[in-house]
Image (cartoon, grey):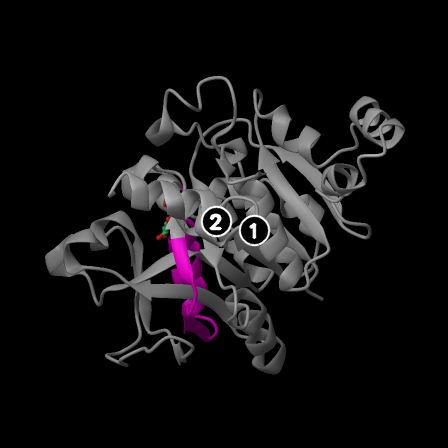
Amino acid sequence: MLSKVIIPVAGLGTRVLPASKAIPKEMLPVVDKPVIQHVVEEAMRAGFRQIVLVTRSGKEAIENHFDANYELEQMLALKNKRALLDAVENTLPRGIEVISVRQPSAKGLGHAVLCAAHVVGNDDFAVMLPDMVIDDEGLACDFAEMVKRYQKNGAGQIMVEGVPEEHVDRYGIVDCGGTALKPGMGAPIKGMVEKPKREEAPSNQAIVGRYILPNRVMELLKTTAPGAGGEIQLTDAMLKLLSEQSMEAFSMRGTIYDCGNKAGLLEANLAFGLKHPETGDALRQFIKSKKL
Ligand code: G1P
């Protein structure tokens, strides 16, 4: 059973301050949708129907975004602004459910995932990190491909991408025993380590924030001690799982933008803005006229 995706949104967003001082970083826009909506739409493309937000105080705007706004909807209906009304009503399409749970203290990604254990019950589940926006337009959806692979053999799936060697200490890094992973390829994982030093990294294949995980990970998280950065790491629990069952890395084909930092957010806005029917031409003209 795989229908729930956990999206931890309790982070403070320090890398995009001061923009995230009074609004959640997940609500910063990429063109005309907040970052979190891009992520939820990707979850839907992969077939997920239940979104479990792990949140904290001060981040209510995320839940409000996926709720009805009666006043606004009534006003748009009265004025017959059909397209805007559709956009507002469809932030959460029919059949999709958003459930939210709280993370009472910032103890790391593993701890955030464990906060959703009672909602997940005995099911296997997915995890998506909300900073990461993936552009897979014109390609098959990478996350949907991971679901397919999981459904074939039951193995946990982790999306990865090759990163420059000097950046391996920013990520969880997987060891696929020397397999040269090409985009669209999967391979069995032999080991993994959270934020290794460059000289200790087993490869340059970085975990990018999309996971399909067997329920057993929840059990393992309960006894996972704080690791890198003093936080309870999902990577450490997955490493324990690996000693019990096989897991696979899937090398993504799309383009990923880390919208949790300023440059990534701007790059996403530029890339999506150039493709958007309402902004593409104006943006191209601006770039040309200013010789950017
Ligand atoms: C988390 C994960 C890490 C992953 C990264 C992707 O780290 O723990 O394995 O590579 O997200 O952004 P964080 O960025 O939260 O420190």
Observer-nearest residue: 252 or 12?
252
- Horizontal side of residue 61 vs 181, given as left or right: right
Where the N terminus falls, by quadrant?
A: bottom right
Identity of the residue drawn at 56% across and 49% down: 39
Residue identifier under label 1: 277
| CA distance for labels 2 and 1 | 6 Å
Q: Is mark 2 within 8 Å of ligand 1?
A: no
Q: Please state which of residues 1 and 185 is positioned toward the viewer in this rendering.
A: 185
What's drawn in magenta, residue-wise? 232-256
Residue 242 among magenta residues: yes
x and y percentages locating residue 140 in the rendered image: 54, 73
Q: Is 114 colored magenta in this rendering?
A: no
**Are there few (<14), some (14-19), or many (20+) residues within 10 Å of tag 2?**
some
Q: Please, what is the three-letter code of the amino acid marked with disc 1?
A: Pro
Q: Is residue 100 above or below residue 281?
A: above
Looking at the image, which residue sits at the far left?
Answer: 199
Q: Amino acid at mark 2?
A: Gly
Do callouts 2 and 1 mark residues in contact (Cβ within 8 Å)?
yes
Q: Which residue is mark 2?
A: 280
* Above-or-below relation of 183 to 66: below
